Image (cartoon, rainbow, N blue to C red):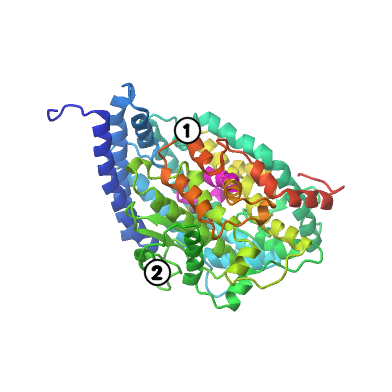
Amino acid sequence: MAAGEPKDAEGFLRDAESALLDLSIETQRAEWVQSTYITDDTTALASRAYARLIEATVRLAKEANRYRSAALAPETARRIHLLRTSLSLVAPSEPAAGMELTGLVNAMQAMYATARVPLPGTPEPANLEELERQLASSRDPDVQLAAWTGWHDAARGLRPKFLRYVELANRGAQEVGFSDLGELWRSKYDMPPGSFERETERLWSQVEPLYRALHAYVRRRLAATYGEDRVGGRDPLPAHLLGNMWAQSWVHLYPILAPAGERAAPDLTRVLLDRATTPRQMVEYGERFFTSLGLPTLPASFWERSMFVRPPDRQVVCHASAWDIDFVEDLRIKMCIDVTAEDFRTIHHELGHNYYQRAYAELPFLYRDGANDGFHEAIGDTISLSVTPEYLRKIGLSDGEDPSPSAEIGRLLHRALETIAFLPFGLLIDRWRWRVFDGTIPPERYNRAWWELRRTYQGIAPAVPRGEEEFDAGAKYHVAANVPYARYFLAAILQMQFHRGLAREIGWTGPLHRASIYGHPEAGARLGAMLRMGQSRPWPEALEAVCGEPRLDAGALLEYFAPLRAWLDEENRGAPLGW
Ligand code: X8Z
Ligand code: ZN
């Protein structure tokens, strides 16, 4: 072929993948350094690298249009589609726009990570982790409200940057053929973007009754703790009393929610602390679970290069994440680990990302991703479902108490306070952003629309008026850092489908919530087969590979929680549901 002549599609893709791989590695390195050492310089360097990657991707996606009408092998057509949708941020091609846009996102992420909040009675302003600890452990509504309000007020400063980011990112998405950035995000699911939105609504309608049952139960117990004047019998729950900054997990309320006669908590935190477990040892427990499935150990570089604890001497992004720096084996996690059951779970979540990344490392670059982003989020959570009392006993992390029938309800309730409480939150973040990107929610209604969605889906309301000068959505990491969120909603459903599929693989016939795949290489083989597919096939095929069903369905989740549902319905008899 003469120089300058258009290449065949396959040759074009090979060259494109090689160029994008190089630029992606450079971006990952720069972003890692920025996230673990936030300064103006590292922010500028990371933004520059990211802008270069975006610029090249947009140029290649436009060039690929040339092949879209050609009769292409399905494999080739798939990789061209993935090229167009591979990024979650696209800049317009005009000079300097790329650097401005990536600079905005990195600056918002840095502002979020470095925010400090003055609190009455404390000498030093508090960071997010400290505020979260207050919300989790205090039962003094004034203390809780101060932590909640302090953090939400701090997000105000993000608003001007966010407005400009929406404008630029939408224009970028339009250049590669989408109506706005939200449509690009919804185009990553092997179905038309409109069908994806309906799919999430269908799943929500499957699980909503269970959420409402949990909500009603929690409301009555909260009213008993805080009084009817703070928690009305038919009202939404006050956002600052749920033990979590975003009310996305209610697990810290467990001590006031436990079934009558049940001890305060299935307390893995206490066991970890009693054993003086270190953050690194917590990660080793996580790795051991994966190797018990026949998966490989983590590379030595993982242990050398990961960040497990908040460094004392510099600013970092503490929000947990998993990294795949070279898209082959330079895997890392970045966390500020606390010795708690919650972080034990998050470690498994992050390692799930790393094991997925490692499994698909052999594929062509554009296939090196999850079957969809919900799959990526669901792997480690699936493993966490196997962290049963039986498993903890096996690895010596049990406090040795025997599960009584009411303890079983207690444990299901504990799990539901993480998983079921999360569902509407997982859905509404992108319900809000999709409408922000498509203009249905204009800037002058950002906050009102945010709280309408919080009320409609979660049944949550702020205890103090929140005007349009506030930017409460920006108080959530993924909004500040441009990370799509529907993935976590999908993951909450998918993890139960995976869990049931793998439980069947090991011949489990007991209740789903008692199954653990620990030490079962046959389950690992089944999971591994799906992980190795990466993004090479439409996700229904990957789903089928692990659980035999090609369709997203909340049936497994409802089966898992069936005993709790029956118990909640009994407890709620005669009490009002909804808000
Ligand atoms: O952001 C995360 C992970 C990193 S991918 C720690 N999660 C969501 C959140 O924290 O809001 C996991 C659960 C939901
Ligand atoms: Zn994740």
Residue ID for mark 2: 314
* Residue 474 within the magenta-colored segment of the rendering: yes
- Amino acid type at circle 2 is Arg
- Residue at image coords 72%, 45%: 210
Local secondary structure at mark 2: loop
Residue 479 visible at all: no
Q: Residue at x 69, y 65 (%)?
A: 142
Tell me, for residue 395, which label it has, or none. none
The residue singled out by tag 1 in the image is 190
At label 1, which amino acid type do we have?
Asp
Q: Is residue 376 above or below residue 310?
A: above
Residue 366 is situated, as x and y percent measured from the top left of the image, at: 35, 41
Magenta residues, start to end: 469-497
Q: Earlier in the sequence, mark 1 or mark 2?
A: 1
Crowdedness of circle 1 by 10 Å Cα count: few (<14), some, many (20+)?
A: some
Q: Mark 2 near ligand 1 (CB under 8 Å)?
A: no
